Image: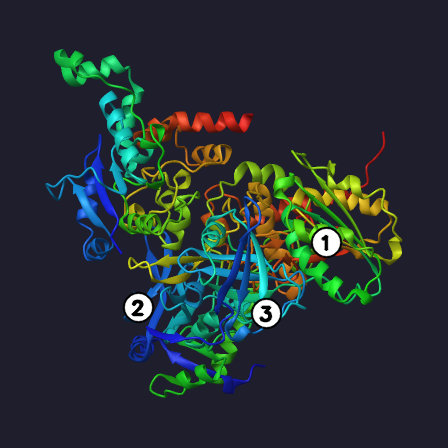
Amino acid sequence: MNRQVLIDSPYEVKAGMIFQTRKMTEFEKYFQIVLPGSEDLGHEPGQFVMISIPGVGEVPISVSSSPTQKGFFELVVRSAGMVTAALHRLEAGDTVGIRGPYGKGFPYRAMQGSDLLFIGGGCGNIPLRSLIHYALDCRSRYGKIHILVGCKSPEMMLFVDELSTWSERPDINLDQTVDQGGPGWKGKVGLITKLIPPLAIEPEKTFAVVVGPPIMYKFVIQELLKKNIPSGQIILSMERHMKCGVGKCGHCQIGPHYCCQDGPVFTYEEIRYNHEAI
Amino acid sequence: MPDISEYVFLDKNKLDFFVSKLNTRQRVVAPVRKGVKSYAFAEVPSAKDISWKYIPTILPPKKYFMPQYETIQKFDKSKRTWETVVSSEPIVILGVHTCDLAGIEFLNAMMSSAPCDAHYRNRKANITLIGIECLDYCDGSASCAVMKNELPHGGYDLFMTEMKQGFISHVGSDRGRNIASDSRIFTPAKPEHIRELEELRARKKDIFKPEINVSHEELKNLFSQSFESNMWREEMEKRCVSCGNCTNVCPTCYCFDLRDELDLSLTTGERQRVWDSCQNETFAKVASGENFRKKKGLRQRHRYMRKFYYPVEKHGLYGCTGCGRCTRTCMAKISLKETINKLAEEQQNSKEPVLNQ
Amino acid sequence: MTKPRVAFFDFACCEGCQLQVANMGETLLDVLQAIDVVEFREVMSEKSDDYDVAIVEGSITTPHAVERIKEIRRKASVLIAYGSCATIGGVNGMKNNFNLDDIRGSVYGEQARYFETIPTRAIHQVVLVDYFVNGCPVYIPEFVKVLKSALSGIPYRVPDHAVCVECKLNENECMYDKGITCLGPVTKAGCNSWCVNNGNICYGCRGMVTNPAVDGQKDILEKHKIPLAWVENKMNMYNKACEPDREARLNVEKR
């Protein structure tokens, strides 16, 4: 048996150095990662990377920073499985393996000139943040910006500082809600779907970008359709179990689509008749 | 009329010499008997070890292109390095049925679609394929005729058809030409050989007939309209036991898992690619606990759609070769042919106008 | 770096798993590089109360054993249950088919009253278990894999699919094709179909998969004309002590 080193394998891993970490909530941790030679990741908002911890395994994590952010990229990781738990134990100076970026990101070019309605539930706010930052960094290319943020409880709210900065900007309409209130929470309590009906939007020139847990999509989409937003302008990012990231291993399939290549971002139009999507 | 220059002839009494000659250059694998009524591709030192008349092997020859367990990466935690590797060696797969040749062609298309799977590609480059023609059905599980795989459609280096005196062999590649150029083994084919081959193929037309009540062309439409059939949520849900046999033996299934394995030093180790099955309960489960294909019946639906609908839409290829392995191996005796016939019947019934009163 | 201190203990069992470990061959040298064995009755006479990892064989069958395993759990930061007796009750579970006093009488005769007994329990039914290595005996490659997971602080998940999956990858001819009943279709994988590779059937020593597709399995038995009671009996050889676990799980699902 002849063993040969491959240089063009799609499973090739680069060493990424963890430059900074920060605990965000009980379950989420922030990582700033630098590639060799501070090379740019070259991602689009909405894409993901495969993160390796040698001996533990590999997981798909969506990039949370905007491509306008140079020199490093950011991940926010919820500790849910074996690899993410191991990732949480790493600190600045540690190394992780990086593959990617993979997948189809948000259609940020097609959205130019339109109003943007961001709807993020829980972990969904992580990939959404990449696009929000991008849109704010290229503010003149986009129209009105609405941001709706929801999560289970006040302690689980992500990016609290950024949210409060954005809420003060006159060019952003931001609204937040939690499923269950708690001490010190003065904001709204209830499902995120309730924030949609009162919005003043022009449906034909609005792109709604929705990212959240699977259960959220069905109800949010109903509300958006009631608002007459065209199904091709409802943008969703789907969560599936990507293992290879390159459209081979089969784990992430949603009907005919490989979520890792054809997605994770889909328009509602693309998947509304897919029997396995929503 | 086939081009006679593409054919060579192998006399039956030179078969032993042929196999031992192949063996001097590389490992030769061919179907051998395994157990009471099964066969498997395994190393054959000589021609007499080969079962020329065999029903499809337990595992298809894909195991040489993409082994069940395969090291794809070596890592060293202390050095913070990863090295992507492939291990392969020259190998001849002898005696491959046309259904399995079609299976390999399908895998070639999937693994080379961008980005190309370099591990598969490197192994494939080391493999010589020598096919053998089926003159009759393997058994009642096969459905090669409706999948149009009872005859060869390329994808081989050499393709042998057994006739009275010997094997007429079609040269399918430069590598095949190289093997056929050994004049101690092969002689140029004669016009009477070609005539005999044509007669034989004509006889095959009477033997191999579509095995199901749906045509090749209609299969895709049948499945595109069968998503909501009771077949999945009721019959399959009740019968399937999720043992994963159907996908593990399928010549066109290529789903896999990637697993890390540390050495006892706890610093070095490797990443392995292991065959996985969409029939396993946890296949589509994500870390948050959500399982996107929790029901056994819907996992079966997914398997069927990946054979008869999705790849046809995307690549213009059916993912079923008609080899019949899934039917033969099913613990619950779920038959592919019966499933298709039932779906067709169901659809026929739903189309018939409902007579009032 | 100091090596973790590892102690091997046994309860009601045949000590065959200890033998497997002692007998693992060359890999043992690598194992001993990675750990410091401080107690292992079958291979050394030293004992120790100071250990990080406890590797426990056997099931809990007496009140005394309950106290002893609680003490071990208290001292160990990681507890690995290995072998069917420890992970699912194993062969000892057959005791739970009988009335306790009857069985005590038949084993100890007139002395029975001196021997207190309780229904057979797997280790996790008494104390918290961090890692499971199923099997009668344990499959050494899996044992080593679990040990590595424990030493590097990552969980090990026992595959929750049928032995058939690994058996097919090993290209074994199916026992049912030979007309022989095998428990592979309902038993948890992870053993690399060790028994079937060597011509034996699967006896279900690794415990039943969480979701054994009851309807489909009954269908299969009917088709092969195998009485359900016969298979249940076969399954009870190893799995009897696990019944409370299954019942508890079903109750949770119902709710």
Q: Is residue B150 visible?
A: no
Label 2 SS? loop
Residue linked to disc 1 = A165
Q: Count residues near mark 2 (Cα–Cα under 10 Å), then give few for <14, some for 14-19, many for 20+.
A: some
Q: Is residue C231 left or right of residue B198?
A: left
Q: Quadrant of residue C185?
A: top left
The answer for which chain carries disc 1 is A
CA separation, marks 1 and 2?
Answer: 73 Å
Q: Residue at the location (47% across, 29% down)? A: C249
Q: Quadrant of residue C1?
A: bottom left
Label 2 amino acid? Answer: Val
Label 1 amino acid? Answer: Thr
Residue linked to disc 3 = A41
Q: Residue at the location (62% across, 53% down)? A: B305
The answer for which chain carries disc 2 is B
Q: Is residue B97 left or right of residue A182?
A: left
Marks 1 and 2 on same chain: no
Residue linked to disc 2 = B44
Label 1 or label 2, whichever lies nearer to me, is: 1
CA separation, marks 3 and 2?
Answer: 50 Å
Position of residue B268 measured from the top left corner of the image (x, y, whole percent): 34, 63
Position of residue B138 measured from the top left corner of the image (x, y, whole percent): 46, 57
Q: Is residue B111 left or right of residue A177?
A: left
Q: Residue at the location (55% across, 84% down)? A: B3
Q: Which numbered marker is on residue A94?
A: none
Position of residue A42 measured from the top left corner of the image (x, y, whole percent): 62, 71
The answer for which chain carries disc 3 is A
Q: How many marks?
A: 3
Q: Count residues near mark 1 (Cα–Cα under 10 Å), then give few for <14, some for 14-19, many for 20+.
A: few
